[in-house]
Amino acid sequence: VDGQTIGFMLTQLHKATKAGYLSDIAIHPDWRDHGVGSRLIEAVLARLKDQGIEYVYGLTKVENEKIHGLLKKFGFVQGNAFYWFEKYLN
């Protein structure tokens, strides 16, 4: 808007498995709740489909209910296809 970036979404394509990973979405605080996230997801899903991607997934923090609601709006469901492993180095 007016030459300023108000939001972005990062994705990764895994063409061999025809999977897309939604890694990050960020919206400027002044533009949240104005449909920017929805428009970004719509555009990304259309582009992934055009690229031959058949499966899309993302990881979120358990407490991030806002992004959960946004993803559910687009038909995403809580998955069970992956285990999350983590290790703290401190």
Image: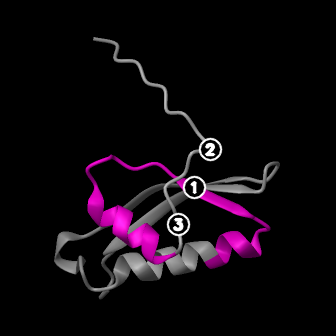
The quadrant where residue 48 appears: bottom right
Query: In the rendered view of the protein, which quadrant contains the N terminus?
Result: bottom left
Query: In the rendered view of the protein, which quadrant contains the C terminus?
Result: top left
Q: Disc 3 versus disc 2: distance between alpha carbons? A: 13 Å
Nearer to the camera, 76 or 47? 76
Magenta stretch: give its range.
Answer: 46-74
- Name the residue furthest top: 90
Label located before the other in sequence (1 or 2): 1
**Residue position marked by numbered label 3 in the rendering:** 76
Q: Is residue 17 magenta?
A: no
Label located before the other in sequence (1 or 3): 1
**Residue position marked by numbered label 2 in the rendering:** 81
Mark 2 belongs to which amino acid?
A: Ala
Location of residue 56 in the rendering, given as x and y in whole percent from the top left corner: 62, 60
Nearer to the camera, 59 or 48? 59
Q: Are marks 1 and 3 in contact (CB under 8 Å)?
A: no
Q: Are marks 1 and 2 in contact (CB under 8 Å)?
A: yes
Mark 3 belongs to which amino acid?
A: Phe
Under tag 3, what secondary structure?
Answer: loop
**Residue position marked by numbered label 1 in the rendering:** 57
Crowding at mark 1 (Cα within 10 Å: few <14, some 14-19, many 20+): some
Going 17% across and 77% down the picture, which residue do you hit?
30
Position of residue 53 relative to residue 87, above or below, is: below
Under tag 1, what secondary structure?
Answer: strand
Mark 1 belongs to which amino acid?
A: Tyr
Position of residue 27 relative to residue 39, above or below, is: above
Q: Nearer the viewer, mark 1 or mark 3?
A: 3
Under tag 2, what secondary structure?
Answer: loop
Location of residue 27 in the rendering, given as x and y in whole percent from the top left corner: 30, 69
Location of residue 55 in the rendering, given as x and y in whole percent from the top left corner: 69, 60
Going 53% across and 80% down the picture, which residue do you hit?
42
